[in-house]
Image (cartoon, coloured by chain):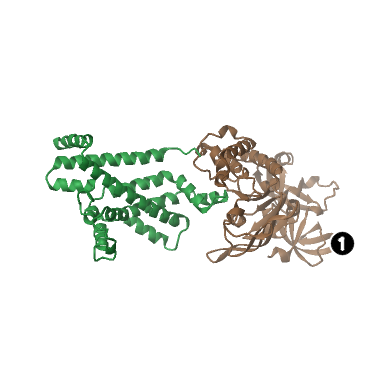
Chain colours: A brown, B green
Amino acid sequence: MSQPILAIRDVVVERAGRAILEIETLEILSGEVLAIVGPNGAGKSTLLLVLALLECPARGDVLFGGEPARRGDLKLRRRLAMVFQEPLLLDATVEANVRSGLALRGVHRAEQKRRAALWLERFAISHLAGRSARTLSGGEAQRTSLSRALVLEPDVLLLDEPFAALDQPTRATLIDDLDAILGQTGAATVLVTHDREEALRLGDRLGVLMGGRLRQIGDPSEIFAAPVDEDVAAFVGVETILSGRIRSQEGGLAAVSVGEHTVEAASDEPVGADVLVCLRPEDIVLAPRDEDDRPTSARNRLPGVVRRVLPSGPHARVELDAGFTVIALVTKQSLEELSLAPGSAVVASFKATAVHLIPHRRAAT
Amino acid sequence: MELIWEGVTEALHLIFSGDAYVYEVTLTSLTVSGSATAIALVIGLGIASLLAFRPPPGRTLALSAFNAGMALPPVAVGLIVAVLLWRTGPLGQLHLLYTPAAIVVAQAVIATPVVTALSTAALQSLPSRLRLQIMALGASRLQATWLLFREARLSLLAAAMAGFGAAISEVGATIMVGGNIKGSTRTLTSAIVLEGQQGDFETAMAFSIILLALIFVVILTFTIVQQRRPQS
């Protein structure tokens, strides 16, 4: 990683007098893939349009290579490329679409064709070169759109949920291919998506955008392990979020009162602090209550009763009533072997290191 | 039926005998209506781009005005243009009244709302983010506009055909501002009126058939261009 190639400072975008995007600072480093995740309406697409110099913020600056960039600056715009959720192809052949950005730059036709052929091959769509873009499937169209952007060899590639409209197998294959291609090109990339899996798969760094504000940015594992607030925690997959207060603190192990229970967490939060206790469903282990007598390293054991079992792809989400709601993720095999069903008495155990505490002052922001 | 048949025969005779009067009237019609359509396209596409891509306040009101303009009564347009171009009128110093240029102005006034309204609808029907995508590919504003026109070409050429049709088939305003002067401002439509009034129905029918054939040839040319698939 190196210097920021693109950055924004104190940017505010308004619609009808209301701020829909407010970002103090965001830097995109050369060669990195920055994934911005957030729910629908968070301002992700607006952020990309600002970065692409296609949206003029009410306040603030976009810096390209450290220098302020004017909105619409054609020279700078031609160092960027953007792919939208819809492929938005022109009514022409696939090859002509891939060449279109080069043609706009006045690149010689023979060179256009040479570079287009290269990228058609990289995205495995050479056989479609002469086809009308209007006859392509969703996956083929998005491959064409990505080729059209990458053939420009941009300094920064901006991707606005490019896989959102694709079916799961097509999406998985395209993500694999794009991941490999981005590794080869070394173009700084900003990917916005509402899909955590996509963000984790492609992103070197992760940013969480909610309500038009960048709530957290950093290493993906850090954000998933230690979300800064309740909204981020919920968005990154923490399904059990409980209010509690630190009752005791000893050598980095905090005892937290949660309702009538005590949860132990690896944390330095001081005694008396109000916190949110965050638990990821995959960190919770379930065992039938009558078989839960073996010693383990899990510091927390909560007795509960299964309230609901919800299918979740190849797994199942088990909702427990332990005096408060706890969600656990188990495989279907475990579900059958443990005979888990509504009414089953179980013990939910989890390690102190699996508990993430968010101080309540931040949770309230 | 006999009158129509005699008209067809007379039309073929006039066309293939090289009748100078017929060729002159046909050429005048083609020239003035072609010019009026070109002016309507320049103005109409410019306004349509503005209304579709950079909507000013009051866009709905403006669009309503252009939509209503598609039903402009040609005689009323002719009267207003004639008053403006009259020797003592505000544009009298241009000395355009009873010249082909006056007919061009009147027909352009009639064709412009047609082209504007249909072109705006055509451009608005493009995917809403296509313009952003084209700009994001590195297009200048002019390049983006050209590409968007090309994407909407089917509907835009239909708008051009409608504009040309409105111009060349117009007669009321043409006579009012042109005066139907032989060798100068006589067009196919005004010639049809004149010959009909003089009782020469065969010649009137012949001019009608020539007019219909001319319209068909021009529209056919537009349609061939419209249906051609772009390769790049």
Q: Amino acid at mark 1?
A: Glu
Query: Would residue A359 be seen by someone viewing this image from the given angle?
Result: yes
Q: Position of residue A237 (x, y in %)?
A: 69, 51
Single out the residue that lies furthest toward the right. A251
Horizontally, is B175 left or right of A180 in the view? Answer: left
Count all numbered tags in the image, as a single digit.
1
Residue B154, given in percent of the width and then of the height, sits at: 41, 43
How far across and down, in percent of the image, does residue A77 sit?
60, 53
| Chain under numbered label 1 | A
Along the line of sight, which residue is nearer the eye, B61 or A297? B61
Q: Residues within 10 Å of mark 1 (few under 14, many from 20)?
A: few
Q: Is residue A305 left or right of residue B24?
A: right
Q: Quadrant of residue A148?
A: top right
* Position of B152 relative to A60 (above/below): above
Does A147 appear above or below A35?
above
Residue position marked by numbered label 1 in the rendering: A250
Front-most of B50 and B41? B41
Asked if residue A160 can be seen in this view, the reply is no
Q: Is residue B34 above or below residue A59?
A: above
* B15 on left or right of B230: left
Image: B12 above or below B146: above
Q: Nearer the viewer, residue B77 or A159?
A: B77
Measured from the top left, where is residue A192 in percent x and y?
63, 51
A184 sits to left or right of B137: right
Callout 1: SS: strand
The quadrant the N terminus of chain B occupies is: top left
Quadrant for residue A122, please give it. Answer: top right
